[in-house]
Image: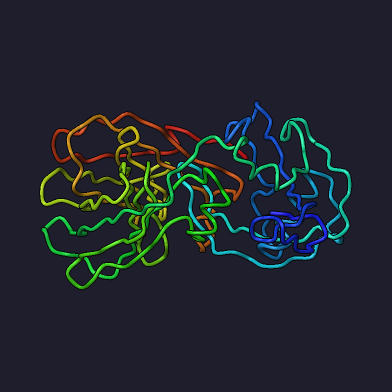
Amino acid sequence: MLLAGTFESAPENSGGLPDDAEILLLERATTLRQHSGQVAFPGGAHDEGEPFPVHTALREAQEETGLEPDGVRVLANLPSFSTLPSPFEVVPVLGKWERPTPGRALDAGETARVARIRVGDLLEPANQLANLVLDIAATVTGRVIDENGEGIGGVRVGASVSLGRAVDVLTRWPSLGPTTHTDNDGHYQLSEVPTGSVALSLCDSDGYELERQHVALEPGESKEVDFGSEGGYAVTGIVRIGGVPVENARISLHLEQARQFQRRTDPQGRFRIHGVTEGTYSLWVVWQPGFVKKPTQWRREQLFHVRRTVHVDRDTELDVDLETDGEENL
């Protein structure tokens, strides 16, 4: 993420935002198979042997927008996060574009256009897709349990909202929503949760999202939302490529917008999701050699993925061969 402008505070603006603050964005080509036509920050996959993540971020930005890397002052590397169904672990790099150059799309096969956007324009209420009710908070309590009904302690539960009115959200909830950890018996409580449509996420100790539920919260409401279930079914399976089990493949199992489960395969290529209620789910499995630290027989730029429809009405065992079901080069 590149910021341009004077960085001189303007007291008359919310948060002192400088009048000339800009960010660099691009529109991805509609011919791409991943995130086609979407607006994005410059970035991409790192090349083997190059310093990561700063050199990768600057090189990708140069290739996509034509900027000069020596005109950028790197400010910080932000915490990484996984994005499913996207196949990457994203490491945001924040930089000050001290000597901006005209941005342009260098490769029409990857980038449709490049633009410097005034941040103040993005924050104008008229330019937002939604307005959120933020002045009255809600409370969410619940419990996280395993397949045996035992509470799971120490896992992170968080609430997140769409940016909506970005200034208001960032002022009151700098992390876009509160987070907490379960106690030894699996109980949790989230206070000052924004109202409206809210996503509740359950993450493991590495920050990888395991389960997501969407709830609607009214002003002043207190709602109980549990993760895991003594009931429901178990969806288990193994992920292979040409018969070889693969570690750290990303598994996403979701039922429309109501509930989503995510897992990673173990060193034997196996995964297990418990507490899955009856329904027809969309299953997405993604793997790249870069997901594991040890060398593999596949090229790092290869991407293996498959999408299936899975109906769950009993305990279900899946066998996924990514070489047969889907593979492409990035």
Q: Is residue 91 left or right of residue 138?
A: right
**Which residue is the extreme one toward the top?**
31
Image coloring type = rainbow
Q: Is residue 37 above or below residue 285?
A: above
Q: Is residue 143 above or below residue 198?
A: below
- Report the residue at 25% width, 64% height from top: 188
- Report the residue at 38% width, 38% height from top: 321
Residue 232, x across and y down, in percent: 14, 43
Residue 137, x across and y down, in percent: 36, 54
Question: Front-most of 300 and 82?
Answer: 82
Residue 165, x across and y down, in percent: 54, 45
- Report the residue at 23% width, 71% height from top: 183
Quadrant of residue 190 in the image? bottom left
Q: Is residue 280 above or below residue 302?
A: above
Question: Front-most of 307 and 183?
Answer: 183
Q: Is residue 158 left or right of residue 140?
A: right
- Report the residue at 21% width, 31% height from top: 279
Q: Quadrant of the C terminus?
A: top right
Can residue 92 be seen here?
Answer: yes
Q: Is residue 260 left or right of residue 107?
A: left
Residue 30, x across and y down, in percent: 65, 26
Can residue 264 be seen here?
Answer: no
Question: Front-most of 146 and 309?
Answer: 146
**Total residue callouts:** 0
Q: Quadrant of the N terminus?
A: bottom right
Quadrant of residue 28 in the image? top right
**Which residue is the extreme one toward the front?**
12
